[in-house]
Structure formats: C-alpha cells, structure tokens
C-alpha cells in the first residue's frame, strides 16, 4: 500500500469515533446551538417582521429565520471543527508520534492529505446531523424537491463543505506545525475565528454590515460557503428576514471556484510547512 | 563502501546556531554488531543519532547506512532502519495492535505481513496479551518493549536506540538487554546511545566514548578496560605527596593520579604482586597506610579516565 494518507486518515477517524464523549459533544453542540439560539432569534425576528409587515414579492418563497440561519450554523460548525482540527499535529509533535511519522519513508505530504480527508469526513458527518436535527425542528430545507433533486442538493452542499473544510484544516495544520504550545494554538485559532464568523452572512445578511466590513465579508470564505449551502438547501430565490435573496448559478459557480482556489493555496501552504518542519 | 560496515560516518558535525553539538566525528559500525555511543548528558549522542536517522538535516560530513548515501538517498536509509527514540513516542490513545499496524503501513508493508509480524514481535517482547490495550495503560517498561517491537516491525538492517533503558527499573533494564541481544543474534545490527556504563559494557561489541561532541576513545569493552592497565590500586595514606614520590619509580606502574581520597595507581603487570612491594616500601619509609584496594579496571574507571567525570545513576 503506497497510499500513506489512508493510514493517517484511518488513524484520525479511529480517534474521532473512539472518544465517545468528544464525539457526542461535537455532534450535539451545533444541534443545540441551532435549537436554542436559532429558536430564540427566530422568535424575535418573526415578531419584529410581523409588526413592520414587510410584503413578500409574489411568487417568491418566504422562509423563516430558523431556516435562514441553519445554513449559517452548518457553515460555522465546519469552520470551528476544522480550525481546531489540526490540533492533532501539535499533540503528536509534543506528546505523540510525529517523530515516528517524520522519520518514516512515507512522504510527509501524505500527512496533510490524510488529515484533510478526515477533516472533510468529520465535517460531512456533522453537517448531516445538523441538517437532520434542523428538519426535526422545522427547518424548511429542500422544500418542494423530489428525491433526485434532494440528492443533487446534498451533493452540492457536500462539495462546498469539502472545499471549505480542506482550506481550514490546512490553515489549522499550518498553525499547529508552527506553534509550540496548545495555548498559542488555541489563541491564534480563536483570533482567526471571531472575525471570520461575524464578518460574514452566516447569521444575518452581510448587507447590514458597515460598507468596509461588507467588502471583507465578500472575500470571507465563510460567506461563500453559506451562500452555497443556502443555494442548494433553500433555493435560488427566496425571502427571509424581510429581504429577498437571489443567487444566480453564475454567482454560485464563482463562490465554488473561489473556495477551490482558496483551499488549493492553503493546501500548498500546509504541504510546504510540513516538508520543512524539524522535530527532534 | 566496505561490505563489512553497515554504517560509515566521516567528518560528521552538527551545530545548533553557534553551539557545536557534534564536532567532526568519524566511525564505522560492522554488520551484525552492537555498537554504543557512551557519553554524559549533553555529549551530543542524540544529536548524532538524529542526524543518522534523518530527523535532523546533514550539515557536514558523509554518512552511509546500509549502502545508501544519507544526503542523496534519505528515503532508502529510512527504509532500512528501525528507530527507538529517547522519549516515549507513542499515541496514548491507540492500542498496541493499532500502534504496530500504523507503523507497518507507514513503511508500506503488506497486510498479511503486518499481521504475522505483530504476532511474532509481541511474542518476543511478551506483550501478546496486551494487544488490545491502549498504550496509555501500559507500564513504562511495557511501553519501551512496544517501541522496540515497533522498531523491529519492518525487519530493519539496523536498529537505532537512543537511551533504550532510561527510566526503567533494574529488572526491566536487564530484560530489555536480553531482548536486544536476542534481536542482535537474529542478525540485526544495533546502534545505541547510553550514559549507563554497565549497559555499554554488558551489551556492546564496540563502544565509542563521546564527550563535548567528540569521540575521545573507542574499542571493545575489554580493550577499553585493558587500556587503563592490568589492575588499579587505590591507596590512602597519611601523606599523599610523600607516598606518591616513594612509589612512582616502582617497576610495573603505569600511572599515578591523585584523587579526592588518595592515590589511584594503574599497573602494567599483576597488581597482586606489586601491592606487597608497595606496602613494604611504604612501611620502610614510615608512611602510614589507612586503606588499600586492588581491582580490575571497570567501565566506570574507563569513563572517569577519559571524560574526567564520575557518572553513576
Ligand atoms: N534543538 C536544540 N537546540 C539547541 N541546542 C540543542 C538542541 N538539542 C540539543 N542541543 C544542545 O546540544 C548539545 C548536545 O545535546 P544532545 O541532546 O545531543 O546530548 P545527549 O548526549 O543526547 O544528552 P542526553 O544524555 O542528556 O540525552 C547539548 O548542549 C544540548 O543543550
Ligand atoms: Mg540524548
């Protein structure tokens, strides 16, 4: 077997399923978030909107806030999972088997490839759970779609998630390889997450942000991931929180290419870093 | 490269910034032998071994391992060696079996081979009943044995071990030596570093004593001990200076050094014969003797002689 990354992948997934508490909380957390925060906000938004009485243009599907936000929760979950997902490398470096791996004949890049693959798999599992939980709570994803269309929607969502997950697990791997302490790793990752999360369209439309931040939101990968998920899960023309959202296939394609490009760059960055890392 | 030598190193140096941790060392390891680097803490043992196993870049010097040039074909070198690191290097959350499987896969071993090799090696290091235990639940000695088994998974031509018995109790150390001897008997060349005299003495076919990044003495344990002379006489008298001048011209005396408590005399011929002469001589000169001790040179004496350090723990 020359595919060393499968070995790395297998180990990472074994660890993922081995720690039942961690597994449980990593799956439950986004669901709870959607449940509590989403329900609370939805209640408020819907109250405000009903009092202003904004009219929905004819022929446009109107969705509630919970549905709007569910896509954002999925996107944010993928962000959090992967930005901390490279921690295994720091752990292996300080207390584990990175020395063994680095001194073996396996190409070091397989390490990044394997970890990226497991990051993607975990992200898929998590998003599936959030979607199912959301549907239970009354999120109106895939409304009016037949089985085949739903399947295509899932494929689209999963492709977007894969690219985004790969980008951020590679960023995380890069940070882990550069850092010496868990505190440093934690600090940098948290610092990155905050602006990414809030300067995006995950929880609210980016149009509500100050103009400069709107520009930033435009290049924020999280914005493009959320757009992709909304396009496939809700539709290309819908209204929510009193606003109309229109996504043309062209726009979605650009989002997809942008994420692919971004993921490619981050992947190369992590590859280069792992090639140079020295551990004794 | 000579076929007899499985490792050939010439002019190897390694620096951390401006600290020269390994300073122009050259040595060779014969196929099938147990070779030791013996040296105190900070001597540069780990640095040297880490260059050989490709964890550190080769800055200066030429290294051949199992016929492969380290600088041009590090991948082939990696394929031919097994490693046991100084620190425990295990994933605490993987089982014993998973640890070995992961390692076999890192080296592209076949599935069946991995399976049969695991059975074989766990038998050797007596961990067969721990196969499905997480490594964090193994004792220190078991962890070391697992690491030795892992180092042997790929049937390496050379097994490198950096301080293999550090932190183990005397009984486990002895056991570990037995495993290493067994492995060596099956044809694996062993390269180890240690700061334990007894370990180097008992295990090695060849020892290089290393200090401050340089090799300061090399030889078989016997040769090294013999190089100090036939016997060592330790002598405490009322007047060290007087005693020294009185004895210095005796026939068969190789060297006399003053140590904290008295005189250390190394002899060229049987110390049991010289000792009575010394005692009667000192009696004649009326120098009181408070204690006498005659012994064969040990590895401690060798180490002390070459490094000027007494090191036992
Ligand atoms: N990564 C590093 N950066 C800077 N200096 C280092 C590094 N590693 C080792 N040194 C220094 O190099 C010298 C040799 O260290 P090395 O670890 O090779 O010694 P050693 O013989 O293995 O000692 P020990 O018996 O304690 O393991 C020491 O002075 C040490 O402080
Ligand atoms: Mg060392």
Image (tube, coloured by chain):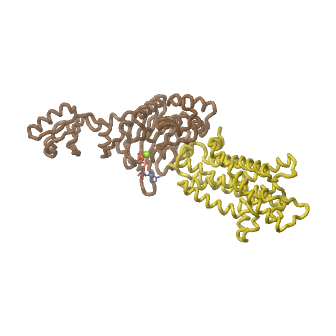
Left or right position of B88 against A10: left
Q: Residue B206 in the image: x percent, y percent?
A: 39, 36
| Quadrant of residue B196 within the rendered picture | top left
Q: Between B5 and B110, which is closer to the camera in this rendering?
A: B110
Is residue A82 visible from the viewing direction of this image? Answer: yes
Left or right position of B235 against B213: left
Q: Which chain is yellow?
A: A
Left or right position of A239 against A19: right
Q: Colour of chain B?
A: brown
Q: Residue A7 in the image: x percent, y percent?
A: 63, 41
- Write the residue at 62% across / 43% down: A19
The answer to whether residue B41 is above or below residue B100 is: below
Furthest toward the right, the residue is A58
Q: Between B30 and A54, which is closer to the camera in this rendering?
A: A54
Is residue B28 visible from the viewing direction of this image? Answer: no
Q: Residue B279 in the image: x percent, y percent?
A: 14, 35
Image label count: 0
| Quadrant of residue B134 within the rendered picture | top right
Left or right position of B281 against A152: left
| Quadrant of residue B79 within the rendered picture | top right
The answer to whether residue B61 is above or below residue B276 is: below
The quarter in which the N terminus of chain A is drawn is top right
Q: Between B185 and B116, which is closer to the camera in this rendering?
A: B116
Q: Residue B42 in the image: x percent, y percent?
A: 40, 49
């Amino acid at each position: 077997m020359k595919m060393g990354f499968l070995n790395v992948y297998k180990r990472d997934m074994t660890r993922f399923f081995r720690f039942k508490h961690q597994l449980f909380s990593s799956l439950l957390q986004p669901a709870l978030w959607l449940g509590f925060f989403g329900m609370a906000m939805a209640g408020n938004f819907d109250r405000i909107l009903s009092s202003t009485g904004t009219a929905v243009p004819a022929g446009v599907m109107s969705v509630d806030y919970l549905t709007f936000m569910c896509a954002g929760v999925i996107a944010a979950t993928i962000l959090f999972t992967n930005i901390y997902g490279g921690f295994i490398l720091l752990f292996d470096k300080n207390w584990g088997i990175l020395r063994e791996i680095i001194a073996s004949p396996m190409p070091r890049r397989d390490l990044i490839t394997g970890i990226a693959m497991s990051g993607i798999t975990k992200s898929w599992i998590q998003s599936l759970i959030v979607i199912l939980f959301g549907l239970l709570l009354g999120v109106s994803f895939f409304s009016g779609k037949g089985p085949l269309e739903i399947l295509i929607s899932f494929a689209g969502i999963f492709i977007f998630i894969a690219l985004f997950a790969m980008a951020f697990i590679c960023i995380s791997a890069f940070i882990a390889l550069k850092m010496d302490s868990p505190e440093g790793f934690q600090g940098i990752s948290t610092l990155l997450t905050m602006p990414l999360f809030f300067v995006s369209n995950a929880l609210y439309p980016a149009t509500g942000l100050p103009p400069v931040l709107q520009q930033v939101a435009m290049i924020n990968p999280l914005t493009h991931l959320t757009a992709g998920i909304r396009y496939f899960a809700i539709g290309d023309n819908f209204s929510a929180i009193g606003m109309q959202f229109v996504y043309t296939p062209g726009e979605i394609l650009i989002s997809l290419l942008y994420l692919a490009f971004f993921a490619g760059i981050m992947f190369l960055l992590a590859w280069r870093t792992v090639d140079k890392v020295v551990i004794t | 490269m000579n076929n007899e030598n499985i490792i050939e190193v010439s002019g190897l140096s390694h620096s951390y910034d401006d600290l020269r941790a390994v300073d122009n060392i050259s040595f060779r390891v014969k196929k099938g032998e147990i070779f030791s680097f013996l040296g105190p803490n900070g001597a540069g043992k780990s640095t040297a071994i880490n260059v050989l196993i490709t964890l550190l870049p080769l800055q200066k010097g030429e290294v051949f391992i199992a016929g492969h040039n380290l600088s041009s074909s590090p991948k082939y070198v990696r394929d031919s060696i097994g490693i046991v690191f100084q620190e425990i290097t295990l994933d605490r959350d993987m089982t014993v079996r998973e640890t070995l499987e992961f390692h076999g896969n890192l080296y592209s071993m076949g599935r069946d081979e991995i399976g049969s090799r695991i059975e074989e090696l766990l038998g050797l290091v007596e961990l067969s009943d721990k196969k499905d235990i997480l490594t964090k639940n193994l004792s220190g000695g078991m962890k070391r044995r697992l690491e030795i088994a892992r180092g042997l998974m790929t049937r390496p031509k050379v097994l490198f071990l950096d301080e293999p018995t550090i932190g183990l109790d005397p009984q486990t150390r002895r056991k570990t030596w037995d495993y290493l001897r067994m492995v060596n008997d099956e044809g694996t060349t062993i390269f180890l570093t240690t700061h334990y005299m007894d370990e180097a003495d008992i295990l090695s076919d060849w020892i290089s004593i290393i200090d401050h990044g340089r090799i300061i003495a090399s030889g078989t344990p016997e040769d090294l001990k013999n190089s100090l002379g036939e016997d060592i006489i330790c002598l405490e008298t009322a007047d060290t200076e007087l005693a020294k001048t009185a004895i210095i011209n005796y026939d068969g005396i190789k060297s006399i050094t003053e140590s904290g408590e008295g005189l250390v005399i190394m002899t060229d011929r049987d110390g049991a014969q010289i000792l009575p002469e010394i005692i009667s001589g000192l009696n004649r000169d009326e120098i009181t003797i408070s204690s006498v001790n005659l012994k064969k040179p040990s590895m401690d004496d060798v180490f002390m002689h070459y490094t000027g350090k007494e090191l036992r723990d």
